[in-house]
Structures are given as structure tokens and as C-alpha cells.
Image (tube, rainbow, N blue to C red):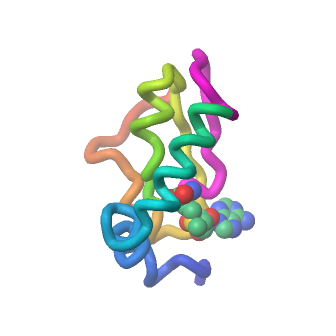
Amino acid sequence: MARYDGLAEWYDGYIHGGGGSEYTDEIRRLLRELVGSGAGRLLDVGCGGGAFFDQLSALGWSVVGVDDSADQLRIAAPPKPRALS
Ligand SMILES: C[S@@+](CC[C@H](N)C(=O)[O-])C[C@H]1O[C@@H](n2cnc3c(N)ncnc32)[C@H](O)[C@@H]1O
């Protein structure tokens, strides 16, 4: 069992207004500064519930997330499967 299995809902609530906004703001700042905008695929390793997919997509990246935790990936998964070409 992966470390974040069983914690994914809690973590998702935490970073979306449950006390983790300072962390989220700092990650968003670092993504703007260190990753920036671009085209092409971006691999988000340890993507968790995909909290930063929206920002990375808005920066122009085609995001692919990978995570050890099946519970985290259930939150990250888009509502419909997407084909990767
Ligand atoms: C602190 S959470 C961060 C999640 C996300 N990046 C965010 O900032 O909201 C760390 C994540 O890394 C994942 N993780 C830890 N070790 C990993 C590994 N070896 N391979 C893939 N994912 C891993 C965990 O399952 C967890 O979802």
C-alpha cells in the first residue's frame, strides 16, 4: 500500500482551503518561476491529486501525471479517459 493511500481525500481538502493555502501559493509561485510557460509534454512526478494540472496546462504544457498512490490518482484522473498520441 502506498503511503498516500487512505490520505488522498484529506490531502485534497488540505491543499484546497483546509490550511494548505500557503503551501499551494508557494508551489504556484515556483511553477511560474522555475517551470514557466512552454509547449510539449510535462511529466508531473508525484502529482498527487493533480492540484497543479490546471496551472501547468494554462502555462501551455500538455501534462501527464504519475503517482505511486492509486487513491491520489483517482482524484487526479479526468472524468473521461484521454488518449495519448
Ligand atoms: C506531498 S504529496 C504532493 C502531491 C502534489 N505534487 C501536490 O503538490 O499537491 C507527494 C506525492 O508524491 C507521491 N510519491 C511519493 N513517492 C513516490 C514515488 N516513488 N513515485 C511516484 N509518486 C510518489 C505520493 O503518493 C504523493 O501523492
| Corner quadrant of residue 74 | bottom left
First to last magenta residue range: 34-47
Q: Quadrant of the N terminus?
A: bottom right
Q: Residue furthest top?
A: 39
Foreground: 49 or 85?
Answer: 49
- Residue lying at 51% horizontally and 44% vertically, measured from the top left: 28
State how many labels appear. Answer: 0
State yes or no: residue 81 in magenta.
no
Q: Residue furthest right?
A: 34
State yes or no: residue 36 in magenta.
yes
Side of 70 where 42 appears, left or right: right
Instruction: Relative to 51, say whether 13 is above or below.
Output: below
Side of 53 where 44 appears, left or right: right
Side of 56 where 79 appears, left or right: left
| Corner quadrant of residue 14 | bottom left
Instruction: Relative to 5, say whether 49 is above or below.
Output: above
Foreground: 33 or 6?
Answer: 33
Residue 79 horizontal/vertical position (percent): 26, 47
Instruction: Relative to 26, say whether 68 is above or below.
Output: below
Residue 27 horizontal/vertical position (percent): 56, 50
- Residue lying at 38% horizontally and 72% vertically, measured from the top left: 19
Residue 5 horizontal/vertical position (percent): 50, 79
Q: Quadrant of ligand 1?
A: bottom right
- Residue lying at 44% horizontally and 71% vertically, measured from the top left: 71
- Residue lying at 59% horizontally and 38% vertically, measured from the top left: 31
Residue 66 horizontal/vertical position (percent): 59, 52
| Corner quadrant of residue 75 | bottom left
Instruction: Relative to 29, say whether 18 is above or below.
Output: below
Q: Is residue 44 visible?
A: yes
Q: Is residue 68 visible?
A: no
